[in-house]
Structure formats: C-alpha cells, structure tokens
Image: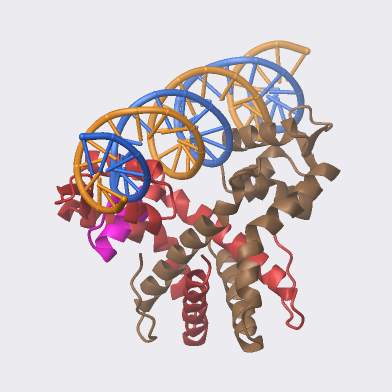
Chain colours: A brown, B red, C blue, D orange
Amino acid sequence: MAKRKIKISPKDDAYCIGDLLHSAAIHLLRKVRAQDRNAGIGPAQLSALSVLVFGGQRSLKELAEAEEVRPPTMSRIVVGLERMRLVRRKATDDKRRMLLEATARGVKILQEGRRRRVKMLVAALQELSEDELREAAAAAEFMRKLIGRLS
Amino acid sequence: MAKRKIKISPKDDAYCIGDLLHSAAIHLLRKVRAQDRNAGIGPAQLSALSVLVFGGQRSLKELAEAEEVRPPTMSRIVVGLERMRLVRRKATDDKRRMLLEATARGVKILQEGRRRRVKMLVAALQELSEDELREAAAAAEFMRKLIGRLS
DNA sequence: AGAAGTGGTTAGCATAGCTAACTATATTTC
DNA sequence: GAAATATAGTTAGCTATGCTAACCACTTCT
C-alpha cells in the first residue's frame, strides 16, 4: 500500500510520512470496522453520537461541522439515531434551530460500540512492553496534534 | 471525540490510547477525503488501485483480502476501475481466476490522487521542526507495526 | 463421472457521502 | 413595516461502498 521509506533528512520525507499515516489510518479503520458487522449502528452514527456524548448538546449544523460532513448527510445520520432513541431533539428560541442531545440509551450504546470497535486495538496494545506503550502514547498524541493543525 | 488521558502507568491506559488512535484515524480520513470531492475516483478505488500499483498484479480474491473487504465488494470496485481504464484483467491458466493489473493510466491517476489526498497532511508535516518530523516518522512507523499485529 | 471446493458475479439491501432545490424562520435594509 | 437577504434543516436524487445469499463456471478430489 505505501512506500516504506522512513529515514529522516530532506523535506520530501514529509510526503512519505504523510503517505504512511494516510495508509495506516485507512487500514486501521478497515480492521476495526469488521467489528461493526452485526452491531446495528454504523460508523458515521457512532462517531456523531460520540460528539454529542463527549462534547454535549449542539445544533445539527455544528454537529455536521464537527464531523466534517454536509448538513444533509448529518440530517440523515441524526434521523437514524433518533429512530433508535439514541438522540433527542430540543427546540430553541430560534425556531429554525434545534439542539441535539444524546439520551441515556445513547450514552450506553456509544460506550458499547466504542469498546467493541477498539477492542482489537486495545488487545494489540496490551501486548506491548512499557516502553512500547510509551511509544504508542506518543504516537497517539502526535496524531491528535497533527489533526488539530490540518484544517 | 476522545478522552484526552495520556499519562502512562496501568494497563487500562491501553483503552485510552486505542480510543485516541481510532478517533485520530477517523478524523484524519475525514480531512483528506475533502480533497476527493471532484476527483472522479473514490477512496476505496484509490486504495485498491494502490495495492496493484505498489504490490503488483494479483487476483480479485487476493485484492479483496488485502483491502479487507468481501469479494463482491471488490468485484464492484474493480468494475469501476476497469471502466475508467485504470486496471486491466488478464486471464490465467485456471479459467476461474483472473489477474488484475494497473494500467499506465492507472499508475498516473493513483499518483495524482494520492498526492491530492495527502497534500494537506504533507503541508502540515512540512511546517514541523526536524525533531518534530522525527516524532512524526516514529508515529507513522509505530502505526504501521501496530496494524501489522492487528488481524 | 459425480461430488465437493474455489473464484467471481449478480441481486438486493443498507449506510453514507454529495449537490441542488425547497421550506420556514430570522435578520437586514430601505 | 415590507421586502430582500441570510440561515437552519429537510427532501430528492445520484454515487460509492459495505454486506449476505444465491448462482455460475471451472477445478479438484474420490
């Protein structure tokens, strides 16, 4: 999938690293997605729900922006979540807007779903030594920082 | 999206790290996907094509396994790639099997697509210092290793 | 030769992404 | 205050990607 060059020196190593990270993200998600098969909740729904659970209530537009999708896409995702009673709408003073909020059931389902998804990842991580785990934490932290710089 | 705990000590930090990596992968791909909008080639097609370009010719089943999707899914992806003349079928002695091979056009399109996709990533990486870039390389390499251990 | 296995496709379903066009409400401007 | 403009969400309709079940065409095994 990706070139394997990792030595550091000139600028265009950035291309190789970018490529590796991109490829890694694709394959990581392919692996964890396998756990979603019979779960009754899709990856986009799970991800949107997690924004509401960890980040609190917000409007559809804000949710769409947080998830980097267009409003119609998020509208449909929310319909699904609502039908499953994982999310609730709340009216606001501005009658065009609504606030979306996770229900108690939503919080529970999210935790189960995430646990299921990352189970394989966690299992792999638990086999690592202390040092390797430190390396893992550094990698995760780096990814988070990098993504923050992306937009 | 994710809890931010990163201190190292007991075993269940593995859960936090797993969660962070999972979340990072989702958001990294969301960002880069934005570049695909008007490109005429989807992410799954691009990824499958890259296997053929970097890994050489192989059968549909092998390609499906490499991409972690089921054969019917890959069958359809290949139909699309073929229609665009990015991939060619070759008959084999075993008349059930076929070998898939990227065309010259396929190689070109792949390079453009990947470059487009990772452009944003590369731009962010190029702003890093030497030390940070080393950190980036370590993170990328770690991700690759981790994924290798997953299945 | 017949049974069982293997490689790929077809059919049919669901999710998830998009744009364009619409409705309803707010806000701005004249 | 009325008209124009802007904003929030939805609807409609397209595409791509996932899946399973069922099928066809070959190979291989007995």
Q: Give the quarter of the image for residue A20.
A: bottom left
Q: Residue at x 64, y 81 (%)?
A: A133
Q: Identify which residue is drawn at 23% across, 62% down.
A: B56
Residue A75 versus residue B26 in the image, above or below: above
Residue at the image point whose x is 82% and y is 43% from the top? A105
Residue B49 is inside the magenta segment: yes
Q: Quadrant of residue A73?
A: top right
Which quadrant of the figure contains the N terminus of chain B? bottom right
Instruction: Give x and y (percent) for residue B30.
Output: 52, 53
**Does the magenta-highlighted stretch encompass residue B115?**
no
**Residue B92 % position (x, y):** 15, 51
**Is B125 situated above or below B62?**
below
Which of B73/D7 is in front?
A: B73
Residue B13 at what x, y percent from top left? 73, 75
Visible in this render: residue A55? no
Expressed as whole percent of the image width and height from the top left, the position of residue B36 reads 40, 48
Number of numbered tags placed on the structure image:
0
- Front-lying residue, A142 or A93: A142
> Relative to B2, does residue A44 appear above or below in the rendering?
above
Q: Is residue A145 visible?
A: yes
- Of residues C30 and A136, the one drawn nearer to the viewer in this rendering: A136
Image position of A52 (left or right of B46):
right
Q: What's the residue at 51%, 87% (across, down)?
A: B131
Magenta residues, start to end: B45-60
Whether residue A48 sits left or right of residue B68 in the image: it is: right
Q: Main secondary structure of the magenta part?
A: helix
- Camera-nearest residue between A97 and C25: A97
